[in-house]
């Protein structure tokens, strides 16, 4: 996995997932990505699953009208014109983001880097945009 920055879309796994979302007519890619971490929440979610789940949570935030500054055009095009996401999906996106920020392989990897605080700020920003 190649990561070049702390933002939710600044890694290869997230951008691969964005391409999958762009090709989808429904929200199954978001549901699947969030469920990958939900299913591991009592354990230790793996980094690749976490990066994809963060991208999915970012897509939910964009769908709510709260995109990050570096939101890919594909995500913006996918959410355009759709009714608001279900409240349960927003709750799941928030839960997944909290889980990743508290106890995950991705958090541990960022803790070992010089950019941990930037990553934490990015995750906290996402949490702030996932309020309903």
Image (cartoon, rainbow, N blue to C red):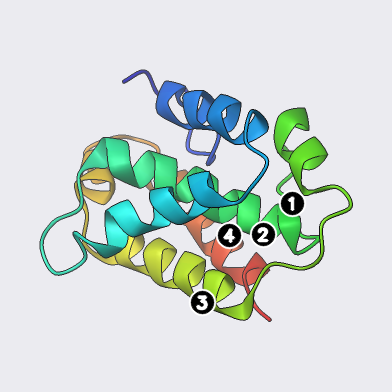
Measured in 3D between alpha carbons, the distance from the residue under mark 4 to the one under mark 1, in whole angstroms, is 9 Å
- Percent across and percent down for residue 39 are 22, 61
The answer to whether the residue labelled 4 contacts the one labelled 1, judged by CB atoms less than 8 Å apart, is no
- Among the two numbered marks 2 and 4 on one chain, the one whose residue lies closer to the N terminus: 2
Which of the 4 image quarters holds residue 7? top right
Measured in 3D between alpha carbons, the distance from the residue under mark 2 to the one under mark 1, in whole angstroms, is 6 Å
- Among the two numbered marks 4 and 1 on one chain, the one whose residue lies closer to the N terminus: 1
In the picture of the structure, the residue carrying the numbered disc 1 is 67
Residue at the limit of the structure toward the front, as seen here? 25
In the picture of the structure, the residue carrying the numbered disc 3 is 91
Does any portion of residue 3 appear in the rendered image? yes
**Which label sits on residue 61?**
2
- Among the two numbered marks 2 and 3 on one chain, the one whose residue lies closer to the N terminus: 2
Mark 4, secondary structure of its residue: helix
**Which label sits on residue 126?**
4
Which of the 4 image quarters holds residue 85? bottom right
- Among the two numbered marks 4 and 3 on one chain, the one whose residue lies closer to the N terminus: 3
The answer to whether the residue labelled 2 contacts the one labelled 4, judged by CB atoms less than 8 Å apart, is yes
Residue at x-position 44% and y-position 21%: 12
Split into 4 quadrants, where in the image is the C terminus? bottom right
- Percent across and percent down for residue 35 are 34, 58
The answer to whether the residue labelled 3 contacts the one labelled 1, judged by CB atoms less than 8 Å apart, is no
Instruction: Bin the neighbour count of mark 1 within 10 Å (Cα to Cα): few under 14, some 14-19, many 20 and up.
Output: some
Residue at x-position 66% and y-position 31%: 22
């Amino acid at each position: 996995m190649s990561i070049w920055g702390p933002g939710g879309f600044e890694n290869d796994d997230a951008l691969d997932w964005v391409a999958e979302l762009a090709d989808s007519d429904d929200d199954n890619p978001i549901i699947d990505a969030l469920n990958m971490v939900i299913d591991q929440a009592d354990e230790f979610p793996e980094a690749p699953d976490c990066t994809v789940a963060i991208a999915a949570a970012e897509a939910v935030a964009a769908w709510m009208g709260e995109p990050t500054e570096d939101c890919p055009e594909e995500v913006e095009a996918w959410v355009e014109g759709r009714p608001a996401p279900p409240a349960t999906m927003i709750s799941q996106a928030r839960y997944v983001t909290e889980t990743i920020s508290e106890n995950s392989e991705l958090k541990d990897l960022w803790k070992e880097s010089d950019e941990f605080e930037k990553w934490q700020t990015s995750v906290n920003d996402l949490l702030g945009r996932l309020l309903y």
